[in-house]
Amino acid sequence: MSDEQTTADEFIRRARRLAEDFQLPQALLAARRARQLDEFNVEAHYLGGVLARRMHRLDEAIQALERACYLEKSLVMGHFLLGHIYQQRGKAALAKHHYGQVFEALDSRAADDPVRFGEGMSVQMLRDLCAAAQEVSSGAG
């Protein structure tokens, strides 16, 4: 199948397979291609952000995750990762904003609900991680 005939979802699946095989540069290229094919695909942007972060390409990770969160305001894993990246960069106000978005989006959800893109993580687990991250952030700043 030629590149032009391949859909964004197929590139996302390819990116996930490549990432599982620790072929991160190729996985990131596949995620970028998925974003090019469907600029409104939340998963393509999120996955691109995750892969870029794993490769320490933080500017690219921020750009992709910000776009994913723009497309889906309640994308808690995107906001959590952005909070973590901004916290690492010493941008406490941005980190606090994104952690706040996590709490807001999880407010009405049951503790044992699964988190989208959370790899089996529950709402309560993410709440706890986010609270710990905020505690570290406020203690450091």
Image: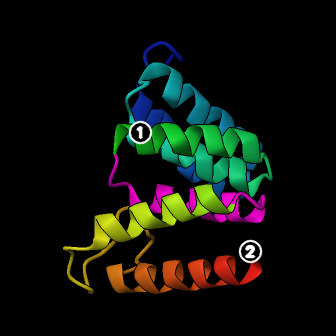
Give the main secondary structure, helix, strand or loop, of the magenta stretch. Answer: helix
Q: Crowding at label 1, few (<14), some or many (≥20) Cα neighbours within 10 Å?
A: some
Mark seen at residue 85 = none
- Asked whether, in this view, residue 16 is left or right of residue 69, the answer is right
**Magenta stretch?**
73-91
Could one spot residue 117 in this view of the protein?
no
Task: Name the quadrant of the C terminus.
Answer: bottom right
Instruction: Provide residue 48's location: percent of width, then percent of height.
Output: 59, 42
- Asked whether, in this view, residue 107 is left or right of residue 36, the answer is left
Q: Which residue is mark 1?
A: 70
Q: CA distance from mark 2 to mark 1?
A: 27 Å
Above-or-below relation of 50 to 110:
above
Could one spot residue 28 in this view of the protein?
yes
- Asked whether, in this view, residue 37 is left or right of residue 112, the answer is right
Amino acid at circle 1? Tyr
Instruction: Provide residue 56's location: percent of width, then percent of height.
Output: 80, 53
Q: Residue at x 78, y 58 (%)?
A: 89
Is 12 included in the stretch rendered in magenta? no
Q: Crowding at label 2, few (<14), some or many (≥20) Cα neighbours within 10 Å?
A: few
Determine the secondary structure under disc 2: loop
Mark seen at residue 141 = 2
Above-or-below relation of 110 to 108:
below
Q: Residue at x 46, y 62 (%)?
A: 77
Determine the secondary structure under disc 1: helix
Instruction: Provide residue 11's location: percent of width, then percent of height.
Output: 50, 34
Q: Residue at x 68, y 57 (%)?
A: 86
